[in-house]
Image (spheres, rainbow, N blue to C red):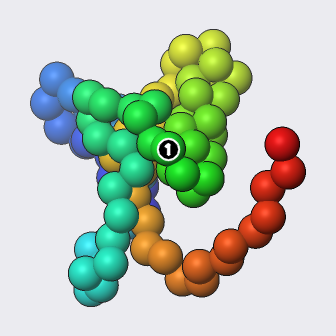
Amino acid sequence: MLVTVTKGPATGLAWIADPLLPSSDIRKFSGTNEAGSNTDLAGMTCDAFAHFSFQDSDEAFVLVDIQGEYILNLHLPIEH
């Protein structure tokens, strides 16, 4: 859902928001003031997506508070 301010000095600002999920298995991949500290594949993927979005938007957009719920836990082999 897109939430847009319609009155006051912040008129026109918008946020993308999701409804609260009823699950207790929510994982937080980044916070408002922190990012880039994940060490597993899912977390590093979120970090990379946030970084790419920031760079690709010419530093106009920042993805924060990335969180999610594990639906399927895949253990994929990674070759080095």
8 over 38 or under it: above or below: above
- Residue lying farthest to the top in this orientation: 58
**x 76%, y 68%: residue:** 76
**x 50%, y 44%: residue:** 39
56 over 22 or under it: above or below: above
From the image, which quarter does the C terminus lie in? Answer: top right
Residue 79 location (% of width, % of height)? 85, 51
**x 29%, y 41%: residue:** 31
Q: Can residue 79 be seen in this view?
A: yes
Q: Can residue 53 be seen in this view?
A: no
- Residue lying farthest to the right in this orientation: 79
Q: How crowded is mark 1: few (under 14 residues within 10 Å), some or many (20 or more)?
A: few
Task: Identify which amino acid the numbered label 1 is placed on.
Answer: Thr
Q: Which of 40 and 59 is in front in this view?
A: 40
Image-based side of 47 in relation to 32, left or right: right
Q: Which of 61 and 11 is in front in this view?
A: 61
Q: Which of 26 and 80 is in front in this view?
A: 80
Residue 55 location (% of width, % of height)? 64, 19
Q: State which quadrant residue 54 falls in.
A: top right
Residue that badge 1 annotates:
39
- Residue lying farthest to the left in this orientation: 8
Secondary element under disc 1, as helix, strand or loop, is: loop
Residue 42 location (% of width, % of height)? 57, 56
Image-based side of 77 in relation to 40, left or right: right
